[in-house]
Image (cartoon, rainbow, N blue to C red):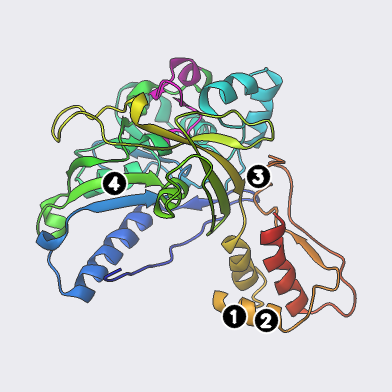
Amino acid sequence: VAASAQKEFTQIFPQPGWVEHDANEIWRSQYAVALEALKKLSLNAARIAAIGITNQRETTVLWDRKTGEPLANAIVWQDRRTAARCDVLRAQGKAALIQRKTGLVLDAYFSGTKLEWLMDHVPGARARADAGELAFGTIDSWLIWKLTGGRLHVTDASNASRTLLFNIHTLKWDDELLALFNIPRSLLPQVVPSSQVLGTTDPALFGAPVRIAGVAGDQQAATFGQACFSPGMAKNTYGTGCFMLMNTGQAAVPSRYKLLSTVAWVGPGSGKHGEELGVQKASACYALEGSVFMAGATIQWLRDGLQMISSADEVEQLASSVDDTQDVYLVPAFAGLGTPHWDGYARAALVGMTRGTNRAHIARAALESIALQ
């Protein structure tokens, strides 16, 4: 690592169970930290070999192709507003079809029902989408659009595989799923390999064009970054949530225990830069995933919601000041529960408290809850 920079951005909670981000703030923060990292090294853009993008996967952005402006706040992966829609689809017997094609459990976690919700609730969105005026993407697509001045509308297969709209066996957007969620194909980004030069940035951004050459969802990128290159190798990452992924090679393994089958990455295609960038089955690697929604976000809650700590790094010392939780347990289902429960209606619970319970016990229970999940 030559230099790094990072910046928090605003978490928006309009209603219980709803989580949103300002897509423009995400773009501004990412552009700012890129400039900051360059400044720390006193480098100009001509010295940068390439940009790689890794991102929160299911967060859903809908924007105007002409102006590049979002039509609404991005709906974040943790958002549960479409849980009732998932219930309806489940009652219609669609869960097995969705799991067979996408490898995913039918849940509000994924992008498909979020995009459908935006189409139904943003005035005029459906008519404008049908007219080809709008674009959908996860955060990778949004950042690439902004980096290239609107020239590229793409996503990679690891991100596409989290939308409920992508067939992980054919590696294509699926017409039956698009019809199920009433999503026009004109909204969708082109699916490209995870590793290949996709294009270059707008020269005005960094003073020179920089190649964009790597795209993968955050957990798949971490699986690759932690060198899980062979089937059977696994990693667990502790971030906003926790995600354990195991490489299953070229087989999309169906789970009997409500794990997700997902695309890990797709290697470079045969096309050269400037030609059509397609994804090929032969270069696809798959994974099984267990998803925990609240890890670092639980510590954020201690800091921002309860104001028990003033900074996240205080939590360890506070939790270590007691020997155990005295049978206090936190179930951090602030955004429902993921694997293996997939309960979008579950809510957080803090149980087992006595008069002797203090904030150190609660802090320790919060840390232990991450491991217990």
In this figure, which residue is indicated by the disc labeled 3?
A: 338
Gap in Å between the C-alphas at discs 2 and 1?
A: 6 Å
Q: Nearer the viewer, residue 270 or 152?
A: 270
Magenta stretch: give its range: 159-179
Marked residue nearer the N-terminal end (4 or 1):
4
Mark 3 touches mark 4? (CB < 8 Å): no
Residue placed at 39% from the left, 25% from the top? 171
Give the amino acid type for the residue marked by disc 4 in the picture.
Gly
In this figure, which residue is indicated by the disc labeled 1?
A: 314
Q: Position of residue 101 (x, y in %)?
A: 52, 22
Label 4: how many Cα within 10 Å (few below 14, some 14–19, many 20+) = some
Front disc: 3 or 4: 4
Q: Nearer the viewer, residue 19 or 160?
A: 160
Front disc: 2 or 4: 4
Marked residue nearer the N-terminal end (3 or 4):
4
In this figure, which residue is indicated by the disc labeled 4?
A: 214
In this figure, which residue is indicated by the disc labeled 2?
A: 318
Gap in Å between the C-alphas at discs 2 and 4?
A: 40 Å
Element type where label 2 sits in the image:
helix
Q: Position of residue 145 (x, y in %)?
A: 26, 43
Mark 2 touches mark 1? (CB < 8 Å): yes
Marked residue nearer the N-terminal end (3 or 1):
1
Element type where label 3 sits in the image:
loop
Q: Position of residue 137 (x, y in %)?
A: 38, 38
In the displayed structure image, the side of residue 157 where residue 275 appears, left or right: left
Give the amino acid type for the residue marked by disc 2 in the picture.
Leu
